[in-house]
Image (cartoon, rainbow, N blue to C red):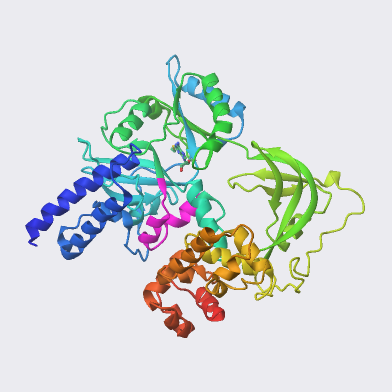
Amino acid sequence: MTREEAQKEIEELIGKINYYNDLYYQKHTSEISDYEFDQFISRLLDLEKKFPELKNPDSPTQRVGGTITREFVTVEHRYPMLSLSNTYSEEEIRDFDNRVKKLLPGESFEYICELKFDGVAISLLYVDGRLLRAVTRGDGVRGDDITANARTIKNIPLKISAKVDKSEFEVRGEIFMSWDVFNEINREKEEAGEPLLANPRNAASGTVKMQDSSVVARRKLGCYVYGLLGENIGRNTHEQAIELLKKWGFNVSPTYRKCKNINEILAFIKEWDDKRNDLPLGTDGIVIKVNNISQQERLGFTSKFPRWAIAFKYKSKNAITRLNDITYQVGRTGAVTPVAELEPVLLAGTTVKRASLHNANEIERLDVRIGDRVFIEKGGEIIPKITGVDLTQRQKKTSPVRFIDKCPECGAKLIRTEGEAAWYCPNVKSCPPQIKGRIEHFIHRNAMDIDSLGEKTIDALFVKGFLGSVADIYKLTEQKIKQLDKFKDLSTRNLLEGIAASKKQPFERLLFGLGIRYVGQTVAEKLASHFKNIDALMQAGYEQLVAVPEIGGKIAESIVAFF
Ligand code: IVH
């Protein structure tokens, strides 16, 4: 293939990919299968590898990442990235409105109310319609250049398709992680025995600062934009600016509304107090902005905040209820988690009966006792937490909770490793929830994907003594399976076929499925591509393991200990 032919094909591929991306991300439809789409991307990757000089920074292949940033370069913002003054009270919103009225005497004005998205602020610089630089807020004056990572975010346009006559402009917005992605990552982390992400905001801010942009790509961040800056942009109002951004292909949340007066603002705040729980991402309030840009300019800034905007923050929802009991759950890794059993109470639309108490330290920190009236809160996280105890209501003769010292499932004496918060059941070989948990993890769709073997079947086979380890899965026979209720010829055959098919899964899935602590999906992929097979990995010592990029001491130790 000649360079000219390659160039022609690359242009055609980019045209097609951008077209399908636009359909998918902006218009939410699709004309081709994911498989066909991936074929276009992989052909383009091939051509760009063969003809590196033909690769563009705004090629859609940038979406899959691959750039490693050793250290982020600090960049000064052209326009400082200020924050907003925050309030939790309606009164202060009225004060804000009165101040605006006073500073714009006799003028009429209106507001745009938007949701306050809970993520990381980003500044995106476009030159000649192409994304040139993405910079975090930093201290407001200087931030980090995270362009390679931002390019992997699908709803940040790399190139503006519409004709844009402004040679330079800057877009401001918020990078976020949706609840779905956040929950999925935490489920995987839990399975890998890794510490969980605290909330989607921390997860997003940690992700944009990762060194390997291909990992960022897999974390599927999103971005909403809410600001347009530059010289002579040709917009008179904030509303026009966001409409323009929408036209250029940016992702603008459809939730904003024009409000003519304080009552309309308060109605907007009230309306979204509940409705925001149905959004796919976290929001923590409302931002109220004067719509007209020349009025914004005249209102100007105080030393810290704009005078033309304010944020109203929602208080997180809380309730008081009784702690009836504390029960203990044993996970796949043997970690014992205390769970608060609560008197059922309604909180932000759902009935709450249980809350995690995390570990013994947390029980001690709260000094929570059985029978106490406790405060529970639903903040940025979906699972409610206990935030405190109403000591004025404490009954006499209560005593501090004594954390159990034996496993509630198998009776083994619990152990605690220095520096770790959790107590563990050390009976790895025969504690039932640990065995069943490991098997459930092994067959999970992200691991060996044996969907013919569900939780109930695992339970039944375990009770019969046929499943004591993941290896036993491959010793199951027709004769054993048929001893279970409901298993006839067809279902037995399905189960055995599912097990047989799993033997064809690639090495990284097997490795993830083994459930080695700290070996989640990403780490498993890295190890698999380096060691190729299980024998090589088993023989690797600590030194060899830490020599693999991104494998640290903790992971290496855990692998050595496992084998
Ligand atoms: S406008 C002059 N609009 O909240 C400040 N900010 O405390 C202009 N945020 O740093 C910011 N959603 O990270 C604006 N719809 C929205 C927002 C929003 C979230 C964040 C942003 C900013 C912080 C301000």
Q: In the picture, residue 515 is in which quadrant?
A: bottom right
Measured as percent of width and height from the top left, residue 17 is found at 24, 48
**Percent position (x, y) of residue 455?**
60, 59
**Would residue 207 be counted in the magenta stretch?**
yes
State which quarter of the image contains the N terminus. bottom left
User: Which of the pair 17/429 is nearer the observer?
Assistant: 429
Out of 25 and 448, give the one closest to the viewer.
448
Residue pushed farthest front?
A: 489
Q: Is residue 116 left or right of residue 131?
A: right
Viewer can see residue 523: no
Where, quadrant-wise, is the C terminus in this rendering?
bottom right
- The dominant secondary structure in magenta is helix
What residue range appears in magenta? Answer: 201-222
The image quadrant of residue 81 is top left
Q: Is residue 186 above or below residue 119?
A: below
Q: Residue at x 82, y 54 (%)?
A: 369
Q: Is residue 456 left or right of residue 212?
A: right
The answer to which of 549 and 33 lies nearer the viewer is 33
Tally the marks.
Answer: 0
Q: Is residue 544 magenta?
A: no
Q: Nearer the viewer, residue 9 or 362?
A: 9
x, y (%) of residue 479? 58, 70
- Residue at 34% x, 53% y is 152
Image point (37%, 56%), residue name: 217
Residue at image coords 33%, 31%? 241
